[in-house]
Image (tube, rainbow, N blue to C red):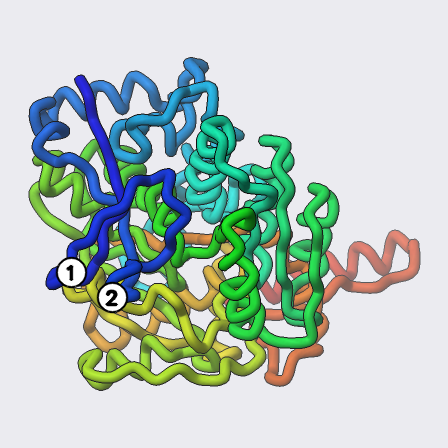
Amino acid sequence: MSYRAWFQCINEQCGATYPLNAVVYQCERCQSLLEVQHDTAALARRGAAAWMKLFEERYKSNQWPYGSGVWGKKEWILPEIDDRNVVSLYEGGTNLFWAERFGKIIGVNDLWIKLCGNTHSGSFKDLGMTVLVSQVKKMISEGAPIKAVACASTGDTSAALATYCAAAGIQSVVLLPRGKISIAQLVQPISNDALVLYLDTDFDGCMRLVQEITKDPTLYLANSMNSLRVEGQKTVGIEIVQQFDWEAPDVIIIPGGNLGKGLMMMKDLGLIAKLPRIVVAQAQRANPLYRSYLRNFETFEPIQAQKTLASAIQIGNPVSFEKAVRTLKQFNGIVEQASEEELADAAARGDRTGMFNCPHTGVALAVLIKLLQAGKIDKSERVVVISTAHGLKFVEMKVKYHQNELEFPSRHANRPVELPANLDAVKQALDDALKNRSQSQ
């Protein structure tokens, strides 16, 4: 069966369309954002049960490229791309971790963490980048004069872009804010042969520059205003539902990002009967969406984002604001914020129960705690927190937390016990530690 997809302006009064091989990021008529639209009528000719069966058969298989968590849903992503142009590192298929102990501690019975950092470059950005770079490879094979793919980044986007471009043999260019990302995030694109431009500005400054340089059609823009990215990232929601035997959870919490589109497709095509609520969690020091939410989204004012431990969401002027607001309205959404102390403590508390959280997951966990305490999430609801990156990308933050070197007390710090190599000293330390543990439980 033949399926097709295209770019379409999100402004309903405009509705202009463009082919996916067009180098276009905003509507040329009205300057609104674009999104990838699919021929839903054609997709609906295959019943919901048949889609579920197909996706189950492909999931984590060795059939190229369908074992990927993204390309297993190829017909819903880029249906017209030839498999030879797919650039995949078998992204997706990440663990849905049952956070039983942490859930009991904070008071929610059915808590799950979607470990999107357990992927090739260590973040959920891989899901979008496999789609974008695959489409670029297709365009180059058709004669498009694209010389390089460029992005502004707070770390994870650059790592994903560099990884997939390296696999495809395409030059990547990344603009990074000097001193505002972790060492691990800086070394990833360096290792993958990107041209790394380390700039004396913040992410929003990098974003302004990359939008200027990609006016040159030989430089392709890879930031999230390019809606090909959303096509891959939307599979997070689809995969969560699949992992719950095709039943949607009650609440999904994510520190930024957009996963509503895949869930909406599932409902439109009859795979699920209800939509979850979506909660967007923001760091208090970079919270323009939260401020707009307090005004019922009637206005939006960009801010100068302040330095935050959650560096990947240190963004004061998100380019996909319109899409985020639309998704929140469709999904009865909530926006909440977390302070630096709240996000660091929440990440550490989660780590003590078997996780290894990045600070952005800490933001989401802190927001979950606040919403539980406020009665906005019920303890009986099934809640999924999206963990967007692996904790190993942020070890400097963790070291500072456990060494009590942050600007606030680290209430859950766990410092190593320095001792002489002496049996009695070791035995005494063990006795003290076990006694303290039994008294605290």
Position of 328 relative to 80 (above/below): below
Q: Relative to 230, is 424 on the left or the right? A: right
Residue 290 lies, in percent from the top left, at: 32, 78
Identified at 27% across, 45% down, the residue is 18
Identified at 22% across, 31% down, the residue is 4
Q: Out of 283 and 344, give the one closest to the viewer.
A: 283
Q: Which amino acid is tagged 1?
A: Cys
Residue 339 lies, in percent from the top left, at: 46, 80
* Secondary structure under the numbered disc 2 in the rendered image: loop
Q: Which amino acid is tagged 2?
A: Cys
Decide which of tag 2 and tag 1 comes sooner along the chain.
1
Residue 49 lies, in percent from the top left, at: 12, 23
| Residue ID for mark 2 | 30
| Residue ID for mark 1 | 14
Is residue 158 at least partly visible in the picture? yes
* Label 1 neighbour load within 10 Å: few <14, some 14-19, many 20+: few
Estimate the spatial distance between the alpha carbons at disc 2 and disc 1, rounded to whole Å.
Answer: 7 Å
